Image (tube, rainbow, N blue to C red):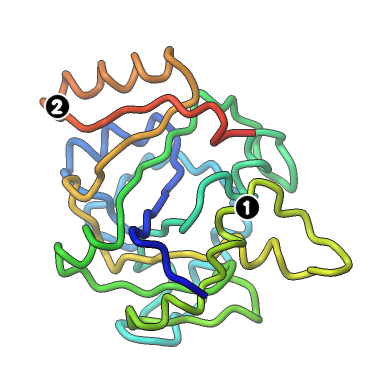
Amino acid sequence: MKIPDTIYLFRITHMDNLNHLFSEGMLTCPNHPAKDENYFNIGDQTLIESRNKKQIPVKPGGYFDDYVAFYFGNRPPMLYNIQQGFKNVIRRQPREIVYLVTSFPAVKEAELSFVFTDGHAYHNFTQFFNHESDLKLVDWNAVNLKRWDETEDDPDRKRRKQAEFLIYKEAPLELIRAIIVYDDAAKKQILSIFEQYDFECNVLVKTNWYY
């Protein structure tokens, strides 16, 4: 499968987590000494706790909580659960959730260690990789789907949609090249945070990246 000319990476997080990101100057994994003790989790807490204890089977190894997780595509199924309050997830308004956007070339330039998967990282069928040449094994059609519901013809589509890119330990703030928000009110809030920390990057309103 043809690899995109530029591979973008997307992390969704709650607006309230940005102050720690800017004050520390980096995204930190859950097992980092500088982690945010008041981190605002927006996913399925039971799943988060379970997957953090799972080992990563390729170098640099460790556990899930040693990594900062990104998706290869926008509109992940977890965002749908967050907006709808499905599957033990507390419902959140879309303007509370932001995308932090970087790219694989930026990760390479920063010489960060990474691992990636061909599907939801907690799924038993999912494979793990740490070589750039294996990016061809990601289903690039699936990760970019807007409708990812499973069908009789493709019962594995949802898993492949959720392929992940995991950065080991931490990612510097300058890795973030854009922040995507739901509406102009959220953009205004982001820009006010930028003023506090003398930070700049593109802030784009993309309502169609939400459900």
The quarter of the rendered structure image containing the C terminus is: top right
Residue in view at x 59 percent, y 62 percent:
141
Q: Is residue 190 left or right of residue 51?
A: left
Residue located beneath label 2 in the image: 197
Location of residue 108 in the rendering, given as x and y in whole percent from the top left corner:
20, 67
Q: Assess disc 1: are there few (<14), some (14-19) or many (≥20) residues with their C-alpha within 10 Å of its C-alpha.
A: some
| Residue 22 appears left or right of 148 | left
Tell me the residue at 74%/42% (across/down): 86
Q: Residue at x 47, y 81 (%)?
A: 128
Using residue 34 as the reference point, say whether residue 133 is left or right of it: right
- The residue at which mark 1 appears reads as 145
- Mark 2 lies on a secondary structure that is helix
The amino acid marked with disc number 2 is: Tyr
Secondary element under disc 1, as helix, strand or loop, is loop
Mark with earlier residue (1, 2): 1
> Three-letter amino acid code at disc 1?
Leu
User: CA separation, marks 1 and 2?
Assistant: 35 Å
Q: Is residue 146 above or below residue 130?
A: above
- Residue found at the far left of this picture: 198
Task: Between label 1 and label 2, give the one nearer the viewer.
Answer: 1
